Image (tube, rainbow, N blue to C red):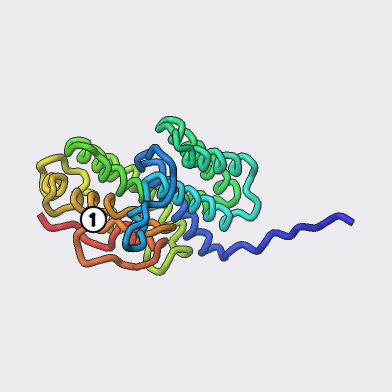
């Protein structure tokens, strides 16, 4: 008699959309994080139990890769073979103590391509949600990771370019009924309010001061970069100066971007 295998039921559509957003953030975070050499392992035993930040960077990168694998398993009961292979290759690169930067980034890049492909083929809304998480993450990570004020200003201009924001807002409009209440509007309005600030160069208004440590989005993004490992399995909020986050859930995009108005000049 032939054995019949029944896949476990998938979460609700809204829950899957939230997971796809988180997955896009996690893959972007992995791609834009430093590639740490050396073995993944535990910190030395001391007089207190270690927290996440006490573990080597290599260990934290492996965890992030395993979180991505877990998200995929929750999103797709039977992932296509090409995606399974891409996941295996990325995890192999992350667990290799002699890992090289180029080989690791190549593996993560291929994983991103297969994820975007597989999710879009499975459900176009999942592909959009994944792209939304990736785009929101890069809005925070790329300026925060810049090495100089000039590079940071250039990244701000690129991230807040009008065409890019139109695309993100279109995705938010398409997904608004599947995201937490009022999230799509809050994020869209926040991006709109920050666009003129992001378009300024070094030394112009809050961007220039924030880039060198004063108040403004440059400083906020630097804080975000420092804290982005603090919430395992969830995106980390882009805490822009203002009245506080609009939510407290890992897939609440208002929490990711910050439901804030830009600082007054």
How many C-alpha atoms fall within 10 Å of the one at disc 1: few (<14), some, or many (≥20)?
Answer: some
Q: Is residue 15 left or right of residue 140?
A: right
Q: Position of residue 119 (x, y in %)?
A: 55, 48
Q: Residue at x 41, y 56 (%)?
A: 172
Which quarter of the figure has residue 260?
Answer: bottom left
Res. 132 visible in picture: no
- Location of the N terminus (image quadrant): bottom right
Q: Is residue 76 above or below residue 100?
A: below
Q: Position of residue 73 (x, y in %)?
A: 58, 54
Q: Is residue 59 left or right of residue 186?
A: right
Q: Callout 1: helix, strand or loop?
A: helix
Q: Position of residue 258 (x, y in %)?
A: 28, 60
Q: Residue at x 45, y 51 (%)?
A: 63
Which quarter of the figure has residue 11?
Answer: bottom right
Relative to the observer, which residue lies in front, 167 or 130?
130
Q: Position of residue 26 (x, y in %)?
A: 43, 50
Res. 239 visible in picture: yes
Q: Residue at x 22, y 40 (%)?
A: 152
Which residue matches tag 1? 193
Q: Is residue 6 above or below residue 95?
A: below
Q: Residue at x 19, y 48 (%)?
A: 218
């Amino acid at each position: 008699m032939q054995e019949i295998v029944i896949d476990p039921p998938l979460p609700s559509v809204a829950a899957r959309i939230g997971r796809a957003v988180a997955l896009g953030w996690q893959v972007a975070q992995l791609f834009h994080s430093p590639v740490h050499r050396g073995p993944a392992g535990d910190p030395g035993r001391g007089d207190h139990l270690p927290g996440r930040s006490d573990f080597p960077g290599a260990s934290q990168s492996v965890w992030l890769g395993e979180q991505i694998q877990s998200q995929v398993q929750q999103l797709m009961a039977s992932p296509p073979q090409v995606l399974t292979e891409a996941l295996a290759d990325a995890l192999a690169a992350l667990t290799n103590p002699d890992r090289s930067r180029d080989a690791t980034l190549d593996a993560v890049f291929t994983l991103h391509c297969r994820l975007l492909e597989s999710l879009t083929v499975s459900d176009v809304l999942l592909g959009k949600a994944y792209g939304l998480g990736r785009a929101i993450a890069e809005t925070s990570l790329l300026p925060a990771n810049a090495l100089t004020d000039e590079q940071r200003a250039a990244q701000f201009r690129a991230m807040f370019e009008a065409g890019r924001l139109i695309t993100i807002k279109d995705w938010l409009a398409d997904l608004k009924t599947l995201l937490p209440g009022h999230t799509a509007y809050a994020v869209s309005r926040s991006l709109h309010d920050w666009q003129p600030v992001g378009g300024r160069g070094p030394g112009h208004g809050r961007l220039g001061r924030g880039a060198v440590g004063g108040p403004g989005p440059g400083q906020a993004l630097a804080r975000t970069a420092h804290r982005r490992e603090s919430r395992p399995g969830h995106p980390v909020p882009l805490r822009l100066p203002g009245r506080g986050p609009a939510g407290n859930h890992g897939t609440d995009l208002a929490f990711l971007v910050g439901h804030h108005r830009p600082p007054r000049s």
